[in-house]
Amino acid sequence: MRAYSAGGVVFRLAPMCSSEKDFVAEQHNAGSTFPGSEDMLSMEVALVGRSHAGIWALPKGTPQTGETIEQVAVREAQEETGLQVRLIAYIGSISYSFVRDQVRYHKQVRHFLLEAVGGDTNLHDAEYDIVQWFPLHEACRRLTYQNEVNILYLAEEMLQRWLQHRRKEGQK
């Protein structure tokens, strides 16, 4: 049986503290840092978790009748994180199989880059018991599933291009 869902990488840009800036300068590799107008910015990602199972994941869920895949991604991210998000762009999809009640499902999850524009992680729904912000490198380490780590790397590349485009257009 085929199943579809959507979700994404919910991000925010945060100013780097001086010790982070020093570390970046020493390493000569900014990694998940982005030049801002005055300060270096780092990408933080909201992950959803189940503490009893030790699972960390990207927010995602299944469509309701009449929803577009983009609407599913935004709704699920908002419900599961408690954050208000703005859709930036499509990142990519992952596919996997699982068995439930002796039925094999082939699932495709479409991921979008979603900017946090408001809300509060304490207002998330009950599907997960933890929602937490992590710097990108830490989020990659925490995620339970490697295919979601790959989505994070794609999101980082996409965010860099998006920020460059915004700077060219004169936006902050």
Image (spheres, rainbow, N blue to C red):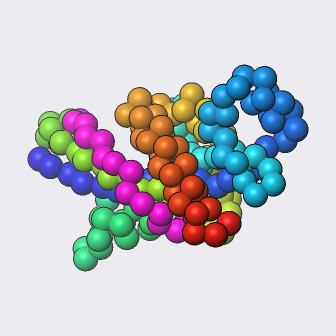
Q: Going by the picture, which residue comes out furthest to the bottom?
A: 66
Asked whether residue 92 is drawn in magenta, I would say: yes
Asked whether residue 168 is drawn in magenta, I would say: no
* Principal secondary structure, stretch drawn in magenta: strand
**Residue at position x 50%, y 52% from top?**
161
Report the span colored magenta: 81-98
Q: Give the percent coordinates (x, y) of residue 96.
A: 25, 37
| Position of 47 relative to 38 (above/below) | above
Q: Is residue 124 left or right of residue 122?
A: left
Q: Is residue 67 left or right of residue 75?
A: left
Q: How many marks?
A: 0
**Residue at position x 47%, y 49% from top?**
158
Q: Residue 7's image quarter?
A: bottom left
Q: Going by the picture, which residue comes out furthest to the top?
A: 27
Q: Give the percent coordinates (x, y) of residue 48.
A: 54, 47
**Residue at position x 68%, y 66% from top?**
172
Answer whether residue 59 is visible to the viewer in this image: no
Viewer-proximal residue, 27 or 71?
Answer: 27
Viewer-proximal residue, 149 or 96?
Answer: 149
Viewer-proximal residue, 169 or 32?
Answer: 169
| Position of 145 relative to 172 (above/below) | above
Q: Residue 61's image quarter?
A: bottom left
Answer whether residue 103 is visible to the viewer in this image: yes
Q: Is residue 63 left or right of residue 111?
A: left
**Residue at position x 80%, y 34% from top?**
20
